[in-house]
Amino acid sequence: MSIPCEVNPESWFSETASDVAQAKEACSFCPVRTECAELGEDEEFGIWGGLSPDDRIATKRFRLTLLEETINSRIRIMQEEGTSISAMARELGLPRKTLADRLRRMSGLAA
């Protein structure tokens, strides 16, 4: 099994546009791309799993936004069902105060 970054590892940490493009292209054929991306998730430098530092930041923001939307959607459903704040907090694994703060922000957004 050939891993592209083992051939010239320095090019995965270059900041030139051509090296970045080549590294990303090589990553697209790598058999360990997913694992590499996970390993480099919090790395400040380099191409990891085909993702640059800016790509990793954008991916992380997207996941957080998706998680927030999922939690808010679940909260709205539980509210419609008449679930108490205590029960919602237990089910979501959130402290009651955190949930109450989130509910206030959500109601402020709806207004």
Image: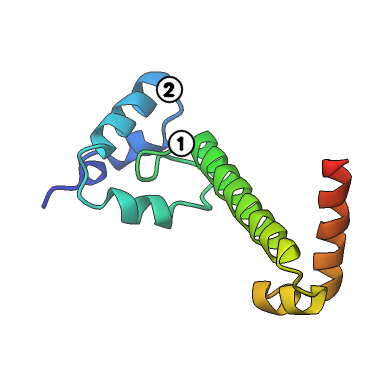
Tag shown at residue 52: 1
- Write down the quadrant of residue 19 in the picture: top left
Quick check: 79 above or below 33? below
Residue 103 x, y percent position in the rendering: 83, 58
Check disc 2 and give the amino acid type: Thr
Relative depth, front residue between 43 and 96: 96
Which element type, helix, strand or loop, lies under badge 2?
loop
For mark 1, give the secondary structure. loop
The disc at residue 16 is: 2
Of all residues, the one furthest to the top in this rendering is 18
| Residue at image location 65% in from the left, 54% down from the top | 73
Report whether 63 appears left or right of 4.
right
Give the percent coordinates (x, y) of residue 36: 34, 52
- Number of on-image labels: 2
Camera-side mark, 1 or 2: 1
The answer to which of 18 and 72 lies nearer the viewer is: 72
Query: Residue placed at 51% from the left, 38% from the top?
Result: 53
Choose the circle earlier in sequence order: 1 or 2.
2
Please give the name of the residue rendered at 70% of the width and 67% of the height, measured from the top-left corner: 81
Q: Residue at x 66, y 53 (%)?
A: 68
User: Between marks 1 and 2, how big is the CA–CA gap?
Assistant: 12 Å
Q: Establish if 97 lies above or below 72.
A: below
Q: Tell me the quadrant of the picture where the C terminus can be found.
A: top right
Within-10-Å neighbours for mark 2: few <14, some 14–19, many 20+: few
**Marks 2 and 1: in contact by CB < 8 Å?**
no
| Residue situated in front as seen by the camera: 77 or 33 | 77
Q: Which amino acid does label 1 sit on?
A: Ser
- The image's mark for residue 39 is none
Packing grade of label 1 (10 A; few <14, some 14-19, many >=20) is many
On the image, the x and y values in percent for residue 95 come to 79, 75
Where in the figure is residue 26, as x and y percent of width and height? 24, 34
